[in-house]
Image (tube, rainbow, N blue to C red):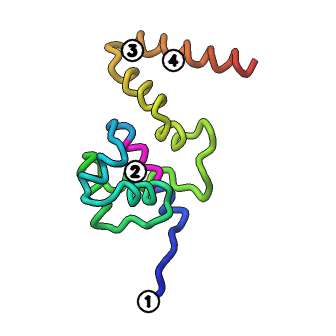
Amino acid sequence: MAKRSATSMDKVVGENIRAARLAKGLSQSGLAERLGITFQQVQKYEKGVNRVGAGRLFQIAAIFSLPISSFFDEAAESAPAKGSRTAARSDPLSIRLVEAFSKLPDTRSRLALLTVAESMNRIRKG
């Protein structure tokens, strides 16, 4: 039986595994250890080079306490565009910003931070 090659959906799943790993502050080696595989295999999953089997995806979802369906979000045929949700979810600084934002105690503080970020973006484009 011929080996099936990875598809664009495998790349999406891999990107979402990477985003979940970064959000938890886990290294590729740390995830690999918990899965009982090599970090190189995790690397291949994240790049979409190797397909993630159903059993392995179930393990990964359990480690991150996420539904399996979350790894299929943002299905796209190409790499995420800069500024897209997928790109932001895989950027460690974006993840830290979202975590800090979500810990702000009130709506007023969140709106203030949002206003600052949007203003900075307009100035940069300006």
Give coordinates of residue 58: x percent, y percent.
Answer: 27, 60
Q: How far is mark 3 from mark 1, CA to CA?
A: 57 Å
Query: Which residue is at 32% across, 38% downward?
Result: 24
The amino acid beneath tag 1 is Met
The front one of 36 and 123 is 36
First along the sequence among labels 2 and 4: 2
The amino acid beneath tag 2 is Ile
First along the sequence among labels 2 and 1: 1
First along the sequence among labels 4 and 3: 3
Q: Is residue 44 above or below residue 123?
A: below
Q: How far is mark 2 from mark 4, CA to CA?
A: 27 Å
Query: From this viewpoint, which residue is outermost toward the right?
Result: 126
The amino acid beneath tag 3 is Thr
Query: Which residue is at 45% across, 33% downward?
Result: 92
Q: Which mark is residue 58?
A: none
The amino acid beneath tag 4 is Leu
Q: Is residue 122 above or below residue 73?
A: above
Give coordinates of residue 72: x percent, y percent.
Answer: 43, 56
Q: How far is mark 3 from mark 2, CA to CA?
A: 31 Å
